[in-house]
Image: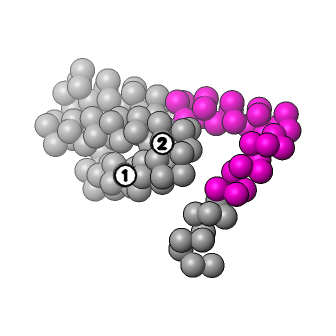
Amino acid sequence: MPARHAGLAHLKVSQTLERDNPKWVQGLDRALVFVALLGPIATIPQIVKIFFEKNAQGLSLISWSIFLALSVPWIVYGFVHREKPIFFAYIFYFFTNLLVVIGIMLYS
């Protein structure tokens, strides 16, 4: 399928799901909003530890930089496809990962 049609197929499936939205899909949508918040929140203790203890020993700048960089395409994807849970989760991931990277650079 050509790239320009792939987006249309996604839109068509999305519109069908919205129209014929069974209760389990509504529950899944609500659960994903929770997961979209919970994932990045799990990084907050790491951020607190780095900045309060002023110590980033044992953390990999390369790994956290990759996590940071990989959140960018997901932000774009969520925006382009109007997938709010993906968009907002990865915006939140971007900023939490950015804080970890900054902390590693400051305190390693």
Expressed as whole percent of the image width and height from the top left, the position of residue 87 reads: 48, 42
55 sits to left or right of 89: left
Instruction: Answer few, some or many: residues within 10 Å of disc 1's Cα (few below 14, many 20 plus, some between 14 and 19).
Output: some
Q: Which residue is mark 2?
A: 87
* Tag shown at residue 8: none
Q: Earlier in the sequence, mark 2 or mark 1?
A: 1
Q: Quadrant of the N terminus?
A: bottom right
Label 2 residue SS:
helix
Q: Is residue 14 left or right of residue 60?
A: right
Q: Nearer the viewer, residue 25 or 57?
A: 25
Verify whether residue 33 appears in magenta.
yes
Residue 18 within the segment the image draws in magenta: yes
Specify the principal SS of the magenta part.
helix
Q: Give the Cα distance between marks 2 and 1.
A: 10 Å
Image point (19%, 27%), residue name: 54
66 lies left or right of 42:
left
Answer whether residue 5 is visible to the viewer in this image: yes
Q: Position of residue 93 (x, y in %)?
A: 41, 39
Question: What is the magenta range?
Answer: 11-38
Amino acid identity at mark 2: Phe
Q: In percent of the image, x 14 and y 37: which residue is there? A: 106
Which residue corresponds to the image point at 24% horizontal and 21% vertical from the top-left? 52
Residue 63 placement: quadrant: bottom left
Q: How many marks?
A: 2
Report which residue position mark 1 lands on: 72
Residue 30 percent coordinates (x, y): 69, 30
